[in-house]
Amino acid sequence: MKKLFLFLALLLGITAAVTGCGQEKQTSSVLRVGMDAAYPPFGFQNMDTKAYEGFDVDIINAIAKEEGLSTEIRNVNFDGLIPALKSGDLDTAINDITVTEDRKQSVDFSKPYYIAGLGVVVRSDNQDIRSKADLSGKTLGVTIGSTGEEAARKIEGANVRTYSTLSDAFLDLKQGAVDAVFNDIPTNEYYVAKTEDHSVKTAPVALSTEYLAIAVKKGNKDLLTKIDDGLAKIKKNGEFAKIYKKWFGKEPPEEIVK
């Protein structure tokens, strides 16, 4: 009996060791997807149907379909997405997330699905901000934890004001509490186009070129492989280009379709 107990103990120890050293696996057929639904055209909530819509929503749903998965979209503030992935509350996050070296330390990223850049939105009557140099000494609105915040803090003499949601930053811009808002150019252009009172405009200032990707918990190689596989499939079968044109009115750049 002692030998049997020793054998079982050894077997359990080996199993635990293998499990501890192995990579995480995606066992559920439902993807818990996090996004801050305040970033049109990437992700937002339809006020009539309450459904989540946008470029990011269509992309992750198309990927999931190719991989035989379904999605459960969860509305999470942008600064809470990576912590939710790390804790296991979310399986993946797609939310206009720029790939940075700092974020790579916390999560794993898929292949890029969008090429973006940081731009600036100002009030329509603003004639002072026409270059990066003009931002010095200004009050700049950004969302917490975004690359916009990183860029704003590098502007000499700038007063950086952070917000939990982009809509709050834009509201303060319209009310004159900030001089400019830093955010991704496509979202900026969409917001300006949808502002019926024409009280805001995009400034002729491009601050960076960025690659957007889908994030998963670090070490979840199984899910990352599925996402990359699904993304490659929709790029190849034309679904990616169809979705891109739906939201941005043009064909995707050749570099991102490869």
Image (cartoon, grey):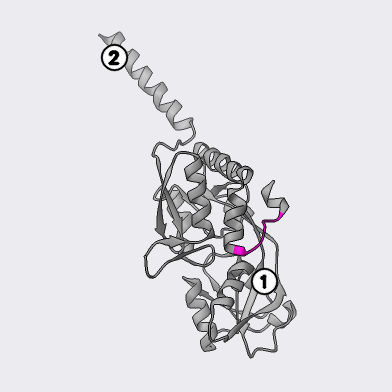
Contact flag, marks 1 and 2 (Cβ < 8 Å): no
Prevailing secondary structure class for the magenta stretch in the rendered image: loop
Mark 2 Cα-neighbour bin, 10 Å: few <14, some 14–19, many ≥20: few
Asked if 112 appears above or below 150 in the picture, the reply is: above
Asked if 208 appears above or below 161 in the picture, the reply is: above
Secondary structure beneath dot 2 equals helix
Label 1 sits on residue: 154
Label 2 sits on residue: 5
Tell which residue pokes out farthest to the left in this image: 1
Secondary structure beneath dot 1 equals loop
**211, 11: nearer the viewer:** 211
Asked whether residue 183 is drawn in magenta, I would say no
- Residue type of the residue flagged with mark 2: Phe
Residue 14 on image: x %, y %: 42, 21
- Residue drawn at the location 57% of the way across and 55% of the way down: 243
- Residue type of the residue flagged with mark 1: Lys
Give the alpha-carbon distance from disc 1 to disc 2, as whole Å.
63 Å
Quadrant of residue 50 within the rendered picture: bottom left
**138, 74: nearer the viewer:** 74
**190, 25: nearer the viewer:** 190
Which region shows up in magenta? Answer: 248-253
Asked whether residue 249 is drawn in magenta, I would say yes
Asked if 234 appears above or below 81 in the picture, the reply is: above
- Residue drawn at the location 61% of the way across and 73% of the way down: 189
